[in-house]
């Protein structure tokens, strides 16, 4: 921090999630949850920190975003952040996590093969309710608390690409989930340890949304559920925000079907885009239709933004990337996240 | 268009009396549920007696069909136009559906044992495969009832594609597996210390399970599994039946996608998996496609003209509108590329596009409009 090439830039920064070490990123399908999680990891690592980006649903989304071959169950460095800093990634596999858990607590990893063959692993990770989630969140909690030999934290932050908004509260509410099954015993103790991390100020659960009705509604529902479950709500990342290119009065007129074609026609002619009167009016009409759709869209987005703001948590805008979320786009998003003080 | 997919003829599918089931699958957030509802409405308005089964608890969708709520029972949608057809809609209640299966297949005492078991309660309301399994179960029920000549179903937003095909198999594999025999052994030999009669390998596993899970958990599981085991024969048989039903010629799978990289990639995967499973694919529906009526005015030309006007300080409004158009054309070009990418890998798969709407669907008129766009 405060290195020569970056004087003041790091020290003077005021970050909204100072002290948070586990960033859980959720969002409705199609909102770009994995992309935002990756960008957040880059942003958090910027300036020389070390961040672990975890995915938990076995989709290999991180590998796709970073343009890498499928990731193994192993923490490995996948990207360098702006200003130095490393992003490590882990594609979490519940079966591997179970075997690791067994080894860590019972020293019986060698039993793994036999267990797998007997269907114990299958059972534990897919059928046993809640156990899978406890294993996954448990792995994240372990990474949060992990220290190296000299007692320093191994990671400055963990970013988890978590299950979608509809399932997030249940996913994190592990104690509740295993309560019916394990009132006492090692699983229960493990769940309690996990709860101690995910329900603490060390954790923030962020939501990714678009300015559309359904994702916004799900975000608000998700926030309400987390609050009921007493889990820490983080910020809202509004993804794929389009720039406003038209002045307010024009949008307003277009919204009320009072958009002036004639001025547009004159402009098109001046720009040399219309060969004859008929052509100019045809193009002008097509463009006017686009303006009208844009105006309706903008109006809807305004409404949705107001609903989000009413949730009372910080909102961050992430721009729509014209070329899609490629590697360069990720860095652009990371920059936007840092500029707005989310990391 | 350099590579164009064959057109997907939606009306031909809807009008064909042999089409009895339409399954809309695809990754999350691409508009599967809306597509399913729009298809159901269009089919009804073209004379079919259709039911839409959704797993998505979208209140808005219920409202758009004029229903105050969607539940596990099909509700009639009023204000459906056209003669002869009708539309019903329902939402899957997976716990209720699971309970009903248990009640139907176990004697009352055993059913009670299962229903009150904490393990069952968790399994029936939170196991990630239960929803998929129950969706297939409900589909089978609707089909067997013979009350509708067309069932349109959307699939759960699974963590991995086509979980709805895999989940029954997974549940079956588990219940047929060796673990089950270990767990049910005590019940079968009549109670206490039953692990003793098993061989040493089993003993170690059982001992370890007790250590890891705790004795109470193990007991609950044993009770649950032995009870469930007794009714599972019927389960499995019906899962197989539903699976075969899906493969039958009367079923049409529609893969729903959006023109974005991830969604199209998922669509590719779906198409391949469906082929592997020999499921009849009808085509791909690409939702939210950005089109322009001024296609002739390219992004590059539009931006250049805007720049020109801005440099001259003239026609500010036109310059802004041209910027807007350029952005839209750029987006349209990217979306086009994503779709062509898909088409070059799957050149024979028919495709239908639905243009992006400025606003969400709120009523039957909106669903009707989507149906029209799907068919045009």
Image: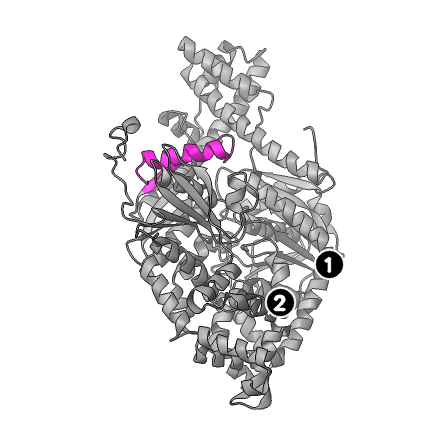
Task: Describe residue B19's horizontal placement relative to residue B103 as left or right.
Answer: right
Task: Describe residue B199's horizontal placement relative to residue A18 as left or right.
Answer: right
Looking at the rendered image, the quarter that the N terminus of chain B falls into is: top right
> Which chain's residue wears label 2?
B
Name the spot of residue A223 as percent of width and height, x first: 35, 53
- Identify which residue, B69 or B213, lies in the foreground: B213
Query: Do pointers 1 and 2 mark residues of a single chain?
Result: yes
Name the spot of residue B229 as percent of width and height, x first: 60, 79
Name the spot of residue A155 as percent of width and height, x first: 36, 48
- Identify which residue, A249 or A336, lies in the foreground: A336
- Identify which residue, B254 or A226, lies in the foreground: A226
Query: Dot 2 corresponds to which residue?
Result: B137
Q: Which residues make up the magenta segment?
A: A315-343
Query: Dot 1 corresponds to which residue?
Result: B247
Element at label 1: helix
For the point 36% across and 45% down, which residue is it? A236
* Total labels drawn: 2
Q: Which mark is residue A293?
A: none
Task: Describe residue B303's horizontal placement relative to residue B105 as left or right.
Answer: left
């Amino acid at each position: 921090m405060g290195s020569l090439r970056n004087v003041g830039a790091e020290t003077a920064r005021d970050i909204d999630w100072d002290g948070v070490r586990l960033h859980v990123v959720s969002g409705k399908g199609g909102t770009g949850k994995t992309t935002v999680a990756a960008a957040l990891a880059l942003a958090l690592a910027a300036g020389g920190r070390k961040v672990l980006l975890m995915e938990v649903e076995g989709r290999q989304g991180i590998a796709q975003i970073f343009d890498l071959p499928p990731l193994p169950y192993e923490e490995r460095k996948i990207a360098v952040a702006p200003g130095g800093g490393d992003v490590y990634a882990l594609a979490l596999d519940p079966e591997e996590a179970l075997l690791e858990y067994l080894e860590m607590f019972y020293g019986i990893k060698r039993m793994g093969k036999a267990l797998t063959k007997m269907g114990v692993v299958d059972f534990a990770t897919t059928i046993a309710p809640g156990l899978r989630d406890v294993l996954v969140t448990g792995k994240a909690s372990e990474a949060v608390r992990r220290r190296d030999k000299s007692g320093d934290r191994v990671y400055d932050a963990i970013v988890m690409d978590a299950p979608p908004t509809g399932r997030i509260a249940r996913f994190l509410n592990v104690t509740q989930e295993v309560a019916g099954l394990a009132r006492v015993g090692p699983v229960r103790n493990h769940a309690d340890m996990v709860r101690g991390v995910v329900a603490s100020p060390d954790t923030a659960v962020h939501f990714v949304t678009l300015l559309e009705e359904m994702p916004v509604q799900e975000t608000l529902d998700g926030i309400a559920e987390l609050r009921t479950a007493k889990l820490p709500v983080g910020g809202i990342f509004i993804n794929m925000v389009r720039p406003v290119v038209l002045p307010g009065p024009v949008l307003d007129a277009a919204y009320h079907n009072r958009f002036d074609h004639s001025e547009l026609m004159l402009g098109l002619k001046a720009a040399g885009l219309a060969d004859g009167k008929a052509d100019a009016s045809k193009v002008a009409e097509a463009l006017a239709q686009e303006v009208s759709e844009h105006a309706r869209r903008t109006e809807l987005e305004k409404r949705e933004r107001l609903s989000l703001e009413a949730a009372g948590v910080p909102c961050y805008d992430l721009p729509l990337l014209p070329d899609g979320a490629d590697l360069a786009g990720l860095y652009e998003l990371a920059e936007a996240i840092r500029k707005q003080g989310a990391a | 268009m350099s590579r164009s997919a064959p057109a997907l003829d939606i009306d031909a599918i809807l009008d064909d009396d042999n089409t009895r089931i339409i399954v809309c699958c695809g990754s999350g957030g691409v508009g599967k549920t809306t597509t399913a509802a729009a298809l159901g409405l269009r089919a009804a308005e073209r004379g079919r007696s259709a039911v839409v089964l959704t797993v998505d608890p979208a209140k808005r969708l219920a409202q758009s069909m004029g229903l105050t709520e969607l539940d596990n029972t099909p509700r009639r949608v009023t204000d459906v136009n056209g003669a002869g057809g009708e539309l019903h809609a329902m939402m899957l209640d997976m716990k209720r559906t699971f309970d009903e299966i248990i009640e139907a297949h176990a004697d009352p005492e055993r059913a009670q044992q299962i229903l009150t078991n904490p393990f069952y309660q968790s399994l029936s309301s939170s196991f990630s495969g239960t929803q998929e399994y129950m969706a297939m179960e409900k589909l089978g029920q609707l089909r067997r009832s013979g009350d509708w000549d067309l069932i349109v179903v959307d699939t759960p937003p699974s963590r991995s594609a086509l979980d709805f095909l895999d989940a029954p198999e997974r549940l079956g594999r588990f219940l047929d597996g060796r673990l089950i025999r270990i767990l049910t052994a005590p019940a079968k030999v009549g109670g206490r210390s039953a692990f003793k009669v098993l061989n040493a390998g089993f003993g170690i596993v059982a001992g370890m399970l007790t250590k890891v899970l705790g004795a109470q958990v193990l007991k609950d599981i044993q009770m649950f599994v032995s009870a469930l085991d007794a009714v599972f024969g019927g389960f499995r048989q019906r899962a197989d039946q539903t699976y075969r039903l899906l493969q039958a010629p009367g079923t049409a799978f529609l893969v729903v996608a959006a023109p974005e990289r991830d969604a199209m990639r998922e669509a590719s995967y779906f198409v391949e998996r469906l082929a592997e499973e020999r499921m009849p694919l009808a085509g791909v529906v690409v939702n939210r496609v950005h089109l322009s009526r001024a296609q002739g005015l390219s992004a590059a030309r539009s931006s250049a003209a805007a720049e020109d006007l801005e440099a001259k300080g003239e026609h500010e409004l036109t310059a802004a509108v041209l910027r807007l158009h350029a952005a839209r054309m750029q987006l349209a070009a990217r979306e086009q590329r994503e779709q062509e990418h898909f088409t070059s890998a799957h050149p024979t798969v028919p495709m239908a596009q639905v243009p992006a709407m400025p606003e969400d669907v709120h009523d039957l008129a909106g669903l009707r409009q989507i149906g029209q766009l799907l068919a045009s």
